[in-house]
Image (cartoon, rainbow, N blue to C red):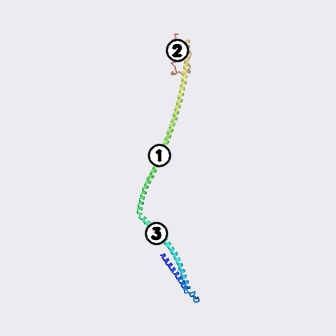
Amino acid sequence: MFESLKKNIQSVQDGITAGLQRLSVGEKSATTPTESNVNLAAGEDLLQMYQTQWATMHHMAEQNAKLAQDIDSAITTLTHECENQHGQMAEIHSLLAHLPNIMAQLHSMLATIGSLRGLFEEVEGGLLALEDLEEDLALQEKTLDLRLSLALSREKHNHRLNALRNELSVTHQAKMVALEQHQETQRKEREQVFSEQFTEDLKNYKERGVVTRRISSSEDEQGLKLEEVDLEQDTSELDQFLNDPA
């Protein structure tokens, strides 16, 4: 539309230019060699009017061309915008066509979310139970450690007690052996003293017929135990005394 208007304006402009050119050529051919009868100012106003109109039309044609370019740019922009909106509308229409499937998938996702929520609650309960079990296991492990420590302490204590018992037993046996040796030494010393005294008394009895020495009270108090008497001593002198006729 604007291109045809531009072409019409251009054709009018070309026609005016051609008319002015013909007018100027006719004026030149109409002049006679005698310049006295020629009116040089003839057609000046008409030419001035045509030139003014042509300049005005040329300016208007330029403005119209500029406006036509602006309108063409606006129409192009509007066309692109309409095409974009048409594409968006087509996309919206396509999405609306898929809306039932989307709604079905949405309901399915909601159901899945509900089932996942139940699973999450079960997992949370399982985690709480696992934490309780972990605490119980930690308590049992601590109890086992304490029992093991107590058993080790008992074993160590029993070991020390057995060592002390063995040490005390060895000490007691050593003391008993020393006591028995001391008692044996005392017994032998007493037997030797009694044997010497008996020999002396026997000699006195043979010579005088009486026993002049008595056992002191301290010796009576000490006494002589039956197990301290040694019956395996030499009795030859006693036998000789008993067999002597005097």
How far apart marks 1 and 2 lie (CA) works out to 90 Å
Local secondary structure at mark 3? helix
Q: Nearer the viewer, residue 64 or 243?
A: 64
Q: Which amino acid does the dot numbered 3 rest on?
A: Glu
Local secondary structure at mark 2? helix
Picture layout, residue 82 above or below residue 59? above
Point out the tag, 3 or 1, that comes first from the N-terminus: 3
Identify the residue at horizontal 49%, vertical 77% (top origin).
Answer: 7
Q: Nearer the viewer, residue 28 or 41?
A: 28
Q: What residue does disc 3 label?
A: 83
Q: Which amino acid does the dot numbered 1 rest on?
A: Leu
Pointer 1 and pointer 2: residues touching (CB < 8 Å)?
no
Q: Which amino acid does the dot numbered 2 rest on?
A: Ser
Q: Residues within 10 Å of mark 1 (few under 14, many from 20)?
A: few
Q: What residue does disc 1 label?
A: 137
Query: In the picture, residue 195 is in which quadrant?
Result: top right
Point out the tag, 3 or 2, that comes first from the N-terminus: 3
Marker disc for residue 236: 2
Q: Position of residue 132 (x, y in %)?
A: 46, 48
Q: Nearer the viewer, residue 187 or 23?
A: 23
Picture layout, residue 31 above or below residue 84? below
Marker disc for residue 184: none
Local secondary structure at mark 1? helix
Query: In the picture, residue 219 is in which quadrant?
Result: top right
Front of the two marks 3 and 1: 3
Picture layout, residue 101 above or below residue 163? below
Tell me: 200 left or right of 133.
right
Q: Residues within 10 Å of mark 2 (few under 14, many from 20)?
A: few
Point out the tag, 1 or 2, that comes first from the N-terminus: 1
Identify the residue at horizontal 53%, vertical 79% (top origin).
Answer: 58
Front of the two marks 1 and 2: 1
